[in-house]
Image (tube, helix red, strand yellow):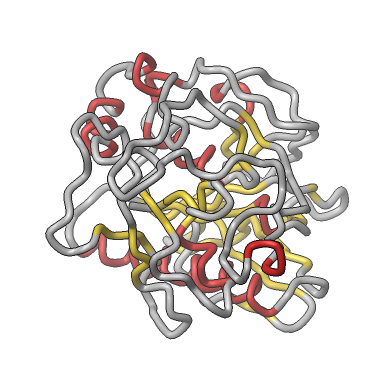
Amino acid sequence: MESARDKHTGEIVEAENLWMLDDVDTDGYECWGCGITMQPAAWEKDKKVRAYFKKKRHTKHLPDCDADAENAVVRQGQKKSVRHILDSAPGLSPSGLKLIDKRPTIDLDLTGGASKPSSTRPASSSSSEGNAPTRESRRQVNSIRQICRAFIRFPHDRDMSLSVPGVAGHNYMTIFKKIKPPIQPYPDAKIFYAQLLWQRLSYDDEMLIIPLSGEWEGGKPSRIYQIHIEWAQWSKAKRTVLRKELEAAQEEAKEAKDKGQQDKAWVFFMGEQDVDNQEIFYVTDYRLICSIMGYITYS
């Protein structure tokens, strides 16, 4: 699974974000669909594959678990609308983006050292292993990754509502915009996306430059779009997460091509285009960029 619920805060956590943690509680996460414990895997910083969550050995998801049915729902969603499922599956199709800087705090003095949330935010409603949490409706998320994943997965449900602050549009169809050749201005704020090239990433302490698709000449890219990540104020962990995610996507894209698959590596982002050099977009917030493997279809 790509996400799980934090047992202590009740938040749904993306596996890639585990790379930012110095210490990972390997028993601190549960299935957001049925409440069984989900253990982090490949989260160590030396791993070259994407982090993910897995079940404990010999453990099964409970019947009617939305998370366990995720793969089946995604397969159905590529062929037809699955809105009746998405409306009650909070981990599959977010309703909007809400950037939150403060996270629930843990007061160890009040809990006697136990990791329990001291904020008023409700923790998971599962009281013991295997008790399914109360079924929830669609929710807002704190980064664009899950929103972008839903855009790829459910092409027949892009008319579902979506709210992104600062972006004109009211659903998945109107909020996303593919940038494509020829190089041109994009004056309206959108969640932009483009194919990630296999070129080596260029970075230093001030900036990361991400090569995207663009204009080609003689079988090679001549003018390409680029994302300039201004990350001087980011923590080392956040820089590492983004770089590892992009490099993993490049490797996955190469493997997909070798296997004859249609999946490609895509970069999604919210940023500002350079007025004088339209090839360049600037991104400053780590929550507003992600890379996802997939095949984008249009219904």
- The picture quadrant where one finds residue 47 is bottom left
- How many marks on residues? 0
> Which percent across, then down, holds residue 19?
52, 72
> Which percent across, then down, holds residue 184?
71, 41
216 relative position to 112: left or right: left
> Which percent across, then down, holds residue 31?
36, 47
Q: As displayed, is residue 174 above or below residue 198?
A: above
Report the residue at 49% width, 73% height from top: 24
Report the residue at 50% width, 15% height from top: 159
- The picture quadrant where one finds residue 171 is top right
Foreground residue among 228 and 58: 58
Answer whether residue 181 is visible to the viewer in this image: no
Q: As displayed, is residue 34 above or below residue 280?
A: above
Foreground residue among 151 and 42: 42
Give the quadrant of the C terminus. Answer: top left
> Which percent across, then down, holds residue 234?
76, 71
Q: As displayed, is residue 114 above or below residue 288?
A: below
Report the residue at 47% width, 26% height from top: 136
Report the residue at 42% width, 57% height from top: 29
Foreground residue among 16 and 275: 16
Answer whether residue 197 is visible to the viewer in this image: yes
Which residue is the extreme one toward the left? Answer: 58
Which residue is the extreme one toward the right? Answer: 276
Foreground residue among 193 and 145: 145
125 relative position to 104: left or right: left
